[in-house]
Amino acid sequence: MSYSEILFPWCIILCLPNARTIVIERFRRRSDAEAYLRILRQINTEATYSIMFDWGDRRS
């Protein structure tokens, strides 16, 4: 896990078929991610987005 990923643990992910996901954007605070998610859902109502806390491997 890179240093920037550690600093920005909240992710918005795009859920695709066959259980695939794409990280759209990373945030430091959940509230920032929620605000961005509201905008994404207004722009594209067909897509399925989720907020996720990316803990990753923090032992390194």
Image: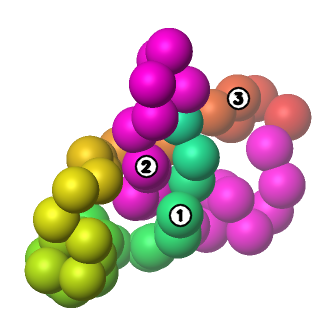
From this view, report whether residue 17 is shown above or below residue 15.
above
What kind of element bears circle 1? Answer: strand
The span picked out in magenta is 1-20
Residue type beneath disc 2: Leu
Q: Are marks 1 and 2 in contact (CB under 8 Å)?
A: yes
- Is residue 20 visible from the viewing direction of this image? yes
Residue type beneath disc 1: Ile
Give residue 41's position: percent from left, percent from top. Answer: 18, 70
From this view, report whether residue 39 is shown above or below residue 44.
below
- Tell me the residue that label 3 is attached to: 57
- Tell me the residue that label 2 is attached to: 14
Residue type beneath disc 3: Asp
At x 40% / y 58%, what residue is drawn?
A: 12
Give residue 13's position: percent from left, percent from top. Answer: 44, 50
From the image, which quarter does the N terminus lie in? top right
Question: In terms of image quadrants, where is residue 53?
Answer: top left
Q: Is residue 49 left or right of residue 16?
A: left
Judge whether residue 13 is colored magenta.
Answer: yes
Rate crowding at label 1 as few (under 14), some (14 to 19) or many (20 or more) other CA atoms within 10 Å.
few
Given this view, does label 3 or label 1 mark the residue nearer the observer?
1
Disc 1/disc 2 C-alpha distance (Å): 7 Å
At x 80% / y 62%, what residue is drawn?
A: 3
Foreground residue among 14 and 33 = 14
- Tell me the residue that label 1 is attached to: 24
Foreground residue among 52 and 6 = 52
Judge whether residue 10 is colored magenta.
Answer: yes
